[in-house]
Image (cartoon, rainbow, N blue to C red):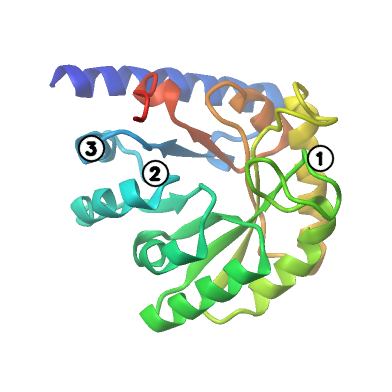
Amino acid sequence: MTDRKAQLAGNLAKVEERIVAACVAAGRKREEVTLIVVTKTYPADDVRILSELGVRHVAENRDQDAAPKAAACSDLPLSWHFVGQLQTNKVRSVAGYADVVQSVDRARLVTALSKEAVRRERELGCLIQVALDAEETGRGERGGVGTGGIEELAGLVAEAPGLRLDGLMTVAPLTGPYAGRELAAFGRLMDLSTDLRSAHPAANMVSAGMSADLEQAVAAGATHVRVGTAVLGVRPRLG
């Protein structure tokens, strides 16, 4: 085993222990929570090692990094999640490799994703990114739609050809009433998920929690956690 593989295996084991402990504390089954490893800024070689170690879900947030990496790893049994703010001029590329786009936050993006999914004869899973730092009808500092915009956007995704409404995503906000209150923020997302599922029962995915706050996300009921640093290490600074 190479040094890097041993390092990643050890880090994955520690994250697994944290998820298991969080599930026990919350009275949940381990299989209720899916780990997505955020591989942004790390090379395709690391993605390949992660696959060898049993990881099946990886996430990226910049198309210029993700597209060549996904191409280099196209032989691996992976589901690719796009989690960054997505500009419409990048949709054509992202729709070629992403299985799920977790950052859907405006109607124009829904239209672009639908058009490209149909063109490629693919089905793209979509999560509505919820901004808990925004006004009800506003937008968040790091993307996302205010809580008042979820219903309309979800309806657009559900009706759009080539798209599948999978659920909701959020990032713990740095400002606003939920700043520093991760458990409350994720609990609010779960309430919003309950509301969404009353109209769209299959949209039961809730993506929340990262390296620092995955326990709070599991406690609230998240179905997916997005962990990068705790698995891959502290990220190199981008130039």
In the rendered structure, the answer to whether residue 119 lies left or right of residue 19 reads left
Query: From where the camera sits, is residue 140 visible?
Result: yes
Q: Nearer the viewer, residue 148 or 48?
A: 148
Mark 3 or mark 2: which comes first in sequence?
3
Residue 200 in view in this figure: no
**Who's the residue at 79% across and 43% down the image?**
134
Q: Earlier in the sequence, mark 2 or mark 1?
A: 2
Q: Residue at x 40, y 59 (%)?
A: 98
| Helix, strand or loop at mark 1 | helix
Which label is found at residue 58? 2
Name the side, left or right, on which 128 lies relative to 47.
right
Q: Between 133 and 156, which is closer to the camera in this rendering? A: 133
- Residue behind mark 1: 188
Height in image: 198 above or below 190? below
The three-letter code of the residue at mark 3 reads Glu
**Mark number for residue 52?**
3
Alpha-carbon span between mark 2 and mark 1? 25 Å
- Dot 1, crowdedness within 10 Å: few (<14), some or many (≥20)? some
| Image position, residue 118 (x, y; %) | 45, 82
